[in-house]
Image (cartoon, helix red, strand yellow):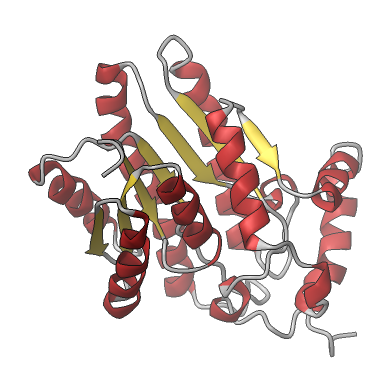
Amino acid sequence: MLNNKYALITGATSGIGYELAKLFAQDGYNLVIVSRNKQEIEQRASEFRQFGIDVIAIQKDLFETKNAFELYEEIRNKGISIDVLVNNAAQGLFGEFKDTDINRELAIINLNIASLVILTKCFLKEMVAKNNDKILNLASIASKIPGPWQAVYHGTKAFVLSFTEAIREETKGYNIAITALMPGVTDTDFFNKAGMTESRIVQDKDAMSNPAEVAKDGFEALMGNKDKVVSGLKNKLQVGMGNITPDDKLAGMMAEQQKPVDKK
């Protein structure tokens, strides 16, 4: 092991979470990786161990909030001190809100908000006592834009961004970096899981961000103690335009971008 620091990363088996895990491993951090898929997480653990680090793979379904508390207790019982918390796990659900499954949406709120808050609360208390450490929360440019066809997802990401900025201010007297990473449309399995493959916004694969580049932006922002980072020039421009565009206009524009290709 290169050092005794541990990074805890949720949703670490694919996409941005996987790329972040690689960056922390390359930087010499030991890893605690979390996913609900046992086979995938064991495969990733074997891969990350090739960096010469300790890797602990924990299977937890964070759609259920009790599992977030169990995750904290399991890590605590192992005697591991978490130096970096990466709240990456999140999902969306595609469709008009009047038609979508409320139980699925409540589970998404649990994952995207409640479990994130639980883990942040538990580990932040320890970080304050140590007067050290780092937290990276995956927000999104969706946090800045109303999201027809993904109303709940956009709402959860607005919470994550606001929450992250608030606790950063509260803890500015401590040596703790708290950063929000704000990617745009990224080439991951997110859209498949959200049932969103027919959305107009995901038809042009070439226009999607590379998850490795997004992860690099987030990693560097966290290490530089920035409050937030919008990944990608196109996304920076979109957020900039959004700051001067009325919300109802933004909602209309996003509805056109996100609706199914066959919808008039």
The quarter of the image holding the N terminus is: top left
Residue 88 at what x, y percent from top left? 47, 53
The quarter of the image holding the C terminus is: bottom right
> Residue at image x 56%, y 41%?
219
Q: How many marks?
A: 0
Residue 61 at what x, y percent from top left? 30, 67
Instruction: Please say whether residue 11 is visible from this viewpoint.
Output: yes
Residue 35 at what x, y percent from top left? 34, 66
Image vertical order of residue 254 relative to residue 102, above or below: above
Image vertical order of residue 233 relative to residue 132, above or below: below
Image vertical order of residue 21 relative to residue 40, above or below: above
Farthest left residue in view? 77
> Residue at image x 83%, y 68%?
207
Instruction: Please say whether residue 88 is visible from this viewpoint.
Output: no
Residue 41 at what x, y percent from top left? 32, 70
Looking at the image, which is closer to me, 211 or 245?
211
Farthest bottom residue in view? 262
Looking at the image, which is closer to me, 38 or 199?
38
Image vertical order of residue 35 relative to residue 52, above or below: below
**Is 72 positioned to the left or the right of 258 in the image?**
left
- State the image quarter where residue 124 is shown: top left
**Is 169 positioned to the left or the right of 233 in the image?**
left
Looking at the image, which is closer to me, 46 or 205?
46
Looking at the image, which is closer to me, 86 or 52?
52
> Residue at image x 40%, y 13%?
174
